[in-house]
Amino acid sequence: MARIMKAAVLAASLFVIAPANAGMTDSASPNDTARFLAGLQPSASSPLAALTQDGAWRQHASRFDSIFGSVDHRQLARIRAWSSAKLTSPSDVLFYMFSGPDFLYANAFFPNASTYVMSGLEPVGPIPDLTRLSRGTVGAGLRGIEGSLRSIVSYSFFQTKEMRRELAATPVRGTLPVLYVFLARSGKTIRDVTLIRLDENGSVLPDNGTDGGKGARGAKIVFAGSDGRERTLYYFGTNVANDGFKASGFAKFCERLGAGDGLVKSASYLLHDSGFSDVRNFLVTHTRLLLQDDTGVPVTYLDRGNWQLRPFGHYIGPISIFPGKYQPKLARLFDKGHESIDFGIGYRWRSQGSNLLMAVRTDAPPQEATASTQAGSVSGAADVVDQPAAIANAAPAADPEETKSTDRNRSASNKHRDRSRSHKRHVARAPWFFWSGAWR
């Protein structure tokens, strides 16, 4: 029996990597691969074009048309309208920490950024080559992607553990296929994709699969929108807790991009904890505008004279699995007056309970050159980034009233805090009822 099982495993692995589709000897372009995975027709000359005649792909395309049509109507179109009205002076660079592969909302809130910097624990994975998979295996990959997107298209955030499980069970692994889908469904054209890693100085090197030390690994995606303007997305699968943010070279990479905008949502309140003080201080000192829900930087770090705070929606407080994270000062800010939003965001994903805080620096440092200008392309040598960031004042000390409030809840929240200190255990966990009727 053991020999039979071993033979079956070997045969399955050979089946996955062998080119099983007749006539498909050439790799598809990244853009055609993205469109195919997103349920959109690739170019007629693509080696993937023949697979779009399969019933499984047609069903996948139909489901994605319905799903993304619904999320655009219910969420993204409203966010784009809100962004256009409220975010009137965006920066060239967007820092989206704890994002996972969520380009969908990064683009909806900040459609005019030239450089997107995103991070999460999930590894980027290999560049997908669907031409080397059997038709049945491609179908399994499509189903895995569908499963991994359940929570974000329903509630605006990834349920990280479920996403990992779905993607790990298929040959289309890592976050790159999800980024492909979101780029394609956002109307982008992918021009180039490169696997990269960082050295200790934050310089970008091509990732050839060899041991690159402690440096963060990820992908650089060059793409264009409908206007034809070239933009760059960097995704790093890396630990941004204090034991990883600087050691991985990620902090220096971000610093060299200069001041930008920041986005934080559904971040498990990690920025409330001392174990993430480095990335919290980076956001406070390197962003001109910080848009976040209440899981982001605690308001006690932002209510000094150099920040203008604009609350949107309703602040109810954290859901029950995050005890000790209620912010009295944020509640008072909302009580003084807030503007409405007509979309849901964060763990309280219904619009009636969602909150956003727009924090704008009144003494914002100037923007530096964008990453695409600074870094150039990865072609075997390090990306050279010469201009240092403009460093503003350090983050203020914690407010005594907030500290007292936290102390009162310390015993109830110690268990969660211990989990949160390790970014390696970061999971945006939602109660079971978040899943009921979610996948339409």
Image (tube, grey):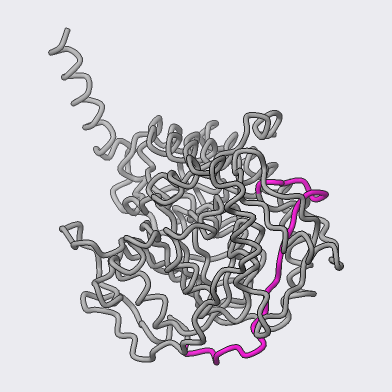
Left or right position of 257 against 207: right
Seen in the picture, residue 222 relative to 24 is either above or below; the reply is: below
Asked whether residue 360 is drawn in magenta, I would say yes
Instruction: Judge by depth and name the residue closer to the eye, 354 or 54.
Output: 354
Task: Using residue 367 as the reference point, say whether residue 156 is left or right of it.
Answer: right
- Relative to residue 212, is residue 286 depicted above or below? below
Rendering coords of residue 11 (x, y %)? 21, 25
Left or right for 199, reference 326: left
State the image quarter where residue 334 is shown: bottom right
User: Quarter of the image holding residue 215?
Assistant: bottom left
User: Chief secondary structure of the magenta span?
Assistant: loop
Question: Looking at the picture, does residue 404 appear above or below residue 347?
Answer: below
Q: Is residue 328 above or below residue 134?
A: below
Quarter of the image where the N terminus is located: top left
Residue 142 appears at what percent x and percent y? 48, 38
Is 440 magenta? The answer is no
Report x, y in % for residue 138.
41, 37
Residue placed most toward the observer, 194 or 49: 194
- What residue is rendered at 72% in x and 80% in y? 308
Q: Quadrant of residue 405?
A: bottom right
Identify the magenta region. Answer: 347-369
- In depth, the one of 375 and 262 nearer the eye is 262
Residue at image location 28% in from the left, 69% down from the top: 198
Percent x, y of residue 12: 26, 26
Residue at x 55%, y 77% (from the top left corner): 396
Task: Give the side of residue 312 with respect to residue 146, left or right.
Answer: right
Residue under the point 65% across and 38% down:
320
